[in-house]
Image: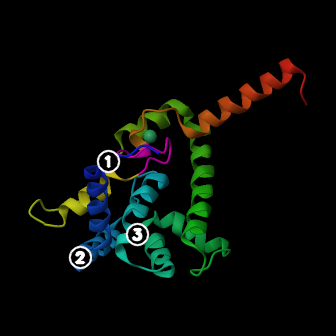
Amino acid sequence: MVNKPPFETWEKMTDEMAQFFISTETQTHVIDKLSKLKQGNWLLEDFWSEFVTWKELSGYNEVALVGLFKKGIHPALARKLVEIGQLRNSDSLDEWYEKALSFERSRREAIEEFRGRESLENSREVKKKPVLDVPRRDPNAMDVDRRREMRRCYNCGETGHLAARCSKPRKERREEIRIVKEAKEDFLTGRE
Ligand SMILES: [Zn+2]
């Protein structure tokens, strides 16, 4: 193992300490943000990235988070999820998200069939991002800013941007390419 300069380790350590000792002020702030967070015109995946960025800082348990998630997603989508009646508040947040996402995806596919891929891509461009305002003077702003930088793009998995702004090919598209490529290789090598 290569020895790293202790300085780097120290920095990392203090960084983690800062994450650990979250002030109640930050927590109150985050709870406020989470309860006001609405999907609106956002892609569900982007709403989710935002949601998971804050959820741990809130200190909320799973049931409370499911409640907030349901309140935050598009009302029509929330209604749909309740209608199917397969989900309970006691189900995990991830289950709620997966189910919501499968609805969103099928809805999006239907829209794409209607309007064609091009116009959907365009509409994605003009979508407004909700703003999470953090006052500059707030001593917790740094916590919050760093948290925001840590958001993960669901499309490429990198941090610092959301899927709506991702420059990489869409995940679904990459998957298509992979499947086609594999099928082609199988065909050429005579594999079954
Ligand atoms: Zn990305």
Q: Which amino acid type corresponds to the residue marked 1 in the rendered image?
A: Lys
- Give the residue displayed 47% in from the left and 35% down from the top: 121
Q: Marks 3 and 2, Cα distance to the nearest angstrom?
A: 15 Å
188 sits left or right of 34 in the view: right
Look at the numbered disc 3 and say if its residue's Cβ is closer than 8 Å to ligand 1: no
Q: Which amino acid type corresponds to the residue marked 3 in the rendered image?
A: Lys
Considering the image in quadrants, where does the C terminus appear?
Answer: top right
Q: Position of residue 125 (x, y in %)?
A: 38, 37
Front of the two marks 1 and 2: 2
Front of the two marks 3 and 2: 2
Q: Which labelled disc corresponds to residue 23? A: 2
Neighbour tally class for label 3: few under 14, some 14-19, many 20 plus, Cα within 10 Å: many
Mark 3 or mark 1: whose residue is earlier in sequence: 3
Look at the numbered disc 2 and say if its residue's Cβ is closer than 8 Å to ligand 1: no
What is the magenta range?
152-163
Q: Position of residue 107 (x, y in %)?
A: 59, 51
Q: Nearer the viewer, residue 70 or 74?
A: 70
Q: Which labelled disc corresponds to residue 141? A: none
- Give the residue displayed 31% in from the left and 51% down from the top: 149
Identify the residue under disc 3.
Answer: 55
Secondary structure at badge 1 equals loop
- Res 37 → quadrant: bottom left
Q: Is residue 97 above or below residue 113?
A: below
Q: Position of residue 89 (x, y in %)?
A: 56, 80
Q: Which amino acid type corresponds to the residue marked 2 in the rendered image?
A: Ser
Residue 70 at least partly seen: yes
Q: Is residue 5 above or below residue 26?
A: above
Front of the two marks 3 and 1: 3
Identify the residue under disc 1.
Answer: 128
Q: Are marks 3 and 1 in contact (CB under 8 Å)?
A: no
Secondary structure at badge 3 equals helix
